[in-house]
Amino acid sequence: MKITKEQVFERAKGGQLWAGCLIENYQDSGAKLENRTPIDDSVIGYIADGQAADVDAAVTVARNTFISGDWRNLSPQERKQVMLRWATLIEQHSEELAALDCVDAGKPITECLNTDMPATIETFYWYAEALDKMFGKVAPTGQQELGLIVHEPIGVVGAVLPWNFPAQMFAWKVAPALAAGNSVIVKPAELTSLSAYRMVELAYEAGVPKGALSLVCGLGEKVGEAIGRHADIDIVSFTGSTEVGRLFLKYSAESNLKEIVLECGGKSPQVVFADADLDAAVPHIMAAAFWNMSENCSCGSRLIVHESIRQSLLDKLIAASTSWKVGNPMDDSVSIGPMVEKAHFEKVKSFIDVSIKEGAKIVSGGKIHSELGSGWYIEPTIFDNVTPEMSLFKNEVFGPLLAVSTFSTDEEAIALANDTHYGLAASFYSQNVHRVMKVARQINAGTVSVNGFSEGNITTPFGGFKQSGFGGKDNGLEAFEQYTQTKVIWIINH
């Protein structure tokens, strides 16, 4: 039955939303955690308080299913049909899923409906269609041998999700891992478990074997660590902070040396050269800086602008910022909702205070709307006079604060862009084709967009350099590769 966004909002007000563990033939302990919405800090329901025992149960089921071949031994065409049915169900329930992410994460409902869900749906359809188009190789040999190079599913996959794009990150991890024939265990962020729970229910309805896809909700220090340390999980794909990414490397080293795929933090530069088309650039700069309340690892939080156009660009950005309405994310006209939780709000607020003390100047925004709901609402804020030694230039904020710095030469611009421990994404603006090719090659980031803000699309791999992560990529055919292992079958013809 389809559920409208209004029905989801009503259930949230009544505290009726639920996300439990979904593990075949297993009853959890009944322990649960309050689920509070960042919109007004009210209880909208509960999630299961998963334990290490739940992870053990999910892994046992996943391994048994993988060994039995109930999912991986289906022909690619059979798996494809199941994945297509699942994608269709997600599309049919997209309004419900969008509303769940809105109340769970405080994301504007228009973004959930018009950006997140179309990308989520596209991901499922794309991997469903791609899974029967992955080919192996035949090695060049003489007449007496035949060398086959084949890709097989790796086994049991642990997918640990972030809270900023709940449905979309579920799709990025689960769609390629499951399409490749693996058994998948999903751990959604404890702050945002609702859409993951619903999508797993829809997977079962589509025909995905329950043993091939499990969901374990709960706290990172319980469920996440148990997944990271489990000796019978073959690979963990994690998106989240660099700090937690380091923990997964530790868990792997201290357990079975499972593969770890990390997509971590970012401090992405936006470089604007003197010859840029400023009117065309401004909407992209604003989106890169403030989209999703800047709770985005590829957020373009450092604006590095040529000194000759600094004031002209600032004037245009300040004018543009007036259209970014702050308010209740259930309102269709709102562009900026609350920070996801109080602790994160306090962290972002502290960056405002520290940046002012360090000498940066607020030229737009800066207001905290304590009168709205939870009070965790921060206006899009632009800081000028930010220098490389300042906290706002160096550290990932994950909140709507844009740091503006200037440069005088191309070499200085490139150096400033690369002056970070991260390397997830970057963008720059120029009409000079020679400069475009030079700068695109010299910026150290996994995705570099020119004359616009972009993370690429489903066909292009997404991942970072340096402390933004390694081990594999989300999206593209490369995502299939990280959930498979390469085997050589060498046949000798006597």
Image (tube, rainbow, N blue to C red):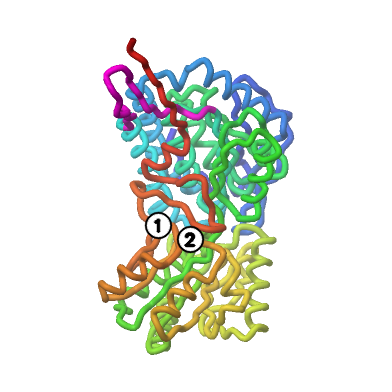
Examine the rendered structure and indicate whether residue 238 appears above or below residue 184.
below
Of mark 2 and mark 1, the one earlier in the sequence is 2
Q: Nearer the viewer, residue 223 or 231?
A: 231
Q: Is residue 134 left or right of residue 19?
A: left
Q: Which residue is mark 2?
A: 298
Q: Is residue 322 visible?
A: no
Instruction: Give the amino acid type for the residue marked by disc 1 in the picture.
Output: Glu
Highlighted range, magenta: 134-155
Q: Which residue is mark 1?
A: 455
Find residue 450 and report its horizontal and vertical position in percent: 33, 67
Find residue 438 and report its horizontal and vertical position in percent: 33, 70
Q: Is residue 143 a member of the stretch shown in magenta?
A: yes
Q: Is residue 53 visible?
A: yes
Instruction: Give the amino acid type for the residue marked by disc 2 in the picture.
Output: Ser
For the view shown, which residue lies furthest in the top direction? Answer: 494
- Tell me which residue sits at (67%, 48%) in the image: 247
Find residue 168 and report its horizontal and vertical position in percent: 46, 47
Identify the secondary structure beneath mark 2. loop
